[in-house]
Amino acid sequence: MITLDGKHGWVISYTNKHNISGKLIEDLNHGDWTFCTSIKPEWDPDKLNFNIDDKGYRGGVVCRNGMHTGIFNVTWPTDDGKDHLKFIKGELWYDSPTGEKKIAVLEKQVKHDGWIDILLSYNREESTLVLQVREDYNAGWETELIKIDGEIIDYGGSHVWVGCANAFHSSPEPQFFQGHIRCLGVFNSVLTDEYRDKFYNEYKDFRGIAKYFRGHAHRRQVYNFEAMKPLAFTNFKTSTPYKAFDFSGNGNHPIIFKREWGVY
């Protein structure tokens, strides 16, 4: 688990910067993809860095920079100012048939202050964006779907950010997340319900799973590990102060990134 204070984020580079990555984050530009995470956001207005006209808060949970796409937690005051509404959003920018850039938005209102499991996936063949949210393990998943009328914009050269939308010093909208994140999965596929549940049921022992698969092709085949097409997954347990271990075997380790560092 990592705790974010609204002042820094984590990044998975799209490049093979040190020649250690197997499958690259850049592969997300081609075909289907899924982001999985589990978060416990800070919702208390008195503790948040309000960054939307001083009226609301928007934090990037798992995003790609540019025209920011991904998972966000958002809160803003009710009309009477006595309370705040809380939402999880999934957003995706695309080029419409007329050439206009548009944004597809899915959202689920959050009722509690505890942990939230979230999945956002894009199916290229069906041109659909799906957001799934689970607040209560026993209550199951709530699902929202939208059809994309156009081609998603090119995110070549975009990193995957965790805990912000873009921490580069030059970005006017870093949208830092405040709260806790206990796992992350990035896949080059649309996860079935079975694989989604495997991820959330087993994220606490990613290290054990990685050891189980290492050097055992038959085990990978039985589990159908390759069908999930993992690019990166971590539970932030095995880490240094600056890096969390990617258990997919692709070397896409999330690296801590502070805004004052400039450009990655």
Image (cartoon, helix red, strand yellow):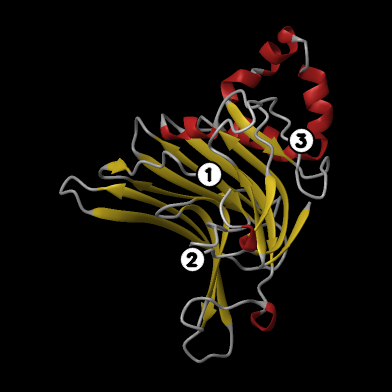
- Residue 231: x and y, percent? 60, 30
108 relative position to 231: left or right: left
The residue at 62%/62% (across/down) is 259
Q: Amino acid at mark 2?
A: Glu
Earlier in the chain: of badge 2 and badge 1, it is: 1
Q: Which residue is mark 2?
A: 173
Label 2, label 3: how many angstroms apart (C-alpha)? 34 Å
Q: Considering depth in this image, is 124 or 249 the residue closer to the camera?
A: 249
Within-10-Å neighbours for mark 2: few <14, some 14–19, many 20+:
some
Q: Which residue is mark 3?
A: 202
The residue at 59%/65% (across/down) is 110
| Residue 67, placed above or below residue 196 | below
Q: Which residue is mark 1?
A: 159
Q: Considering depth in this image, is 176 or 123 the residue closer to the camera?
A: 176
Earlier in the chain: of badge 2 and badge 3, it is: 2
- Residue 263: x and y, percent? 56, 52
135 relative position to 66: left or right: right
